[in-house]
Every structure is written in structure tokens, then in C-alpha cells.
Amino acid sequence: MIRDVKIWRQWEAQWQRSARFDPEENLKVFWTLLEIARSLGAWPPKDPLEGIENDIELARKVNTYVKPPSGYS
């Protein structure tokens, strides 16, 4: 739980300024993870729609706006 939103936002802004974005490194990580998934037999899925109901339900819950309690920003 974030207790001090102002400090969190300052830290987050500083982290975003200092974090480097390297598309080539990100692609290397992606391809490595894909190779691992294939070697484990986890990719490609046998049935691409398996579990779609769970994904939809989770998306509904995550994307539903809930008004925060009074006193929170």
C-alpha cells in the first residue's frame, strides 16, 4: 500500500528518467523467453482460446472503476 502518494510519484518520475530503454535488449529477452516456452512445450498453446473466460473476467475486474474511500487521492 502506498502511504505517501507524493513521495511515490517523485520516486516514480526519477526512476523513469533514469531507466534506460533499449529495444534490442528487450527483443533479446523476448526471444529468449519464447525459446524457453517452446522448449517446455508451453508455446504455442494447443487451444488458443483455452481459459479465455478467466481472462475476460479478470479484465472486467481490473478495468472497473472503484471510487477510492474518502481521504485518498
Image (tube, grey):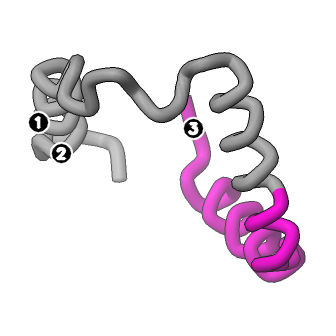
The residue tagged with tag 1: helix, strand or loop?
helix
Q: Few, some or many C-alpha atoms within 10 Å of disc 2 (few <14, some 14-19, many ≥20)?
A: few
Please identify the quadrant where the N terminus is shown: top right
Q: Few, some or many C-alpha atoms within 10 Å of disc 1 (few <14, some 14-19, many ≥20)?
A: few
Using the image as rendered, state which of residue 72 and residue 10 is in the foreground. 10
Label 1 sits on residue: 60
Using the rendered image of the protein, determine whether residue 21 is visible from the camera's viewpoint.
no
Where are the magenta residues, as a range? 1-28
Q: What amino acid does circle 3 point to?
A: Ile
Looking at the image, residue 16 sits to the left or right of residue 41; the answer is right
Looking at the image, residue 17 sits to the left or right of residue 60; the answer is right
Mark 3 or 1: in front is 1
Disc 3 or 2, which lies upstream in sequence?
Answer: 3
Label 2 sits on residue: 63
Q: Position of residue 6 (x, y in %)?
A: 60, 61
Indicate whether 17 appears above or below 36. Answer: below
Q: What amino acid does circle 2 point to?
A: Asn
Q: Are marks 1 and 2 in contact (CB under 8 Å)?
A: yes
Label 3 sits on residue: 2
Disc 3 or 1, which lies upstream in sequence?
Answer: 3
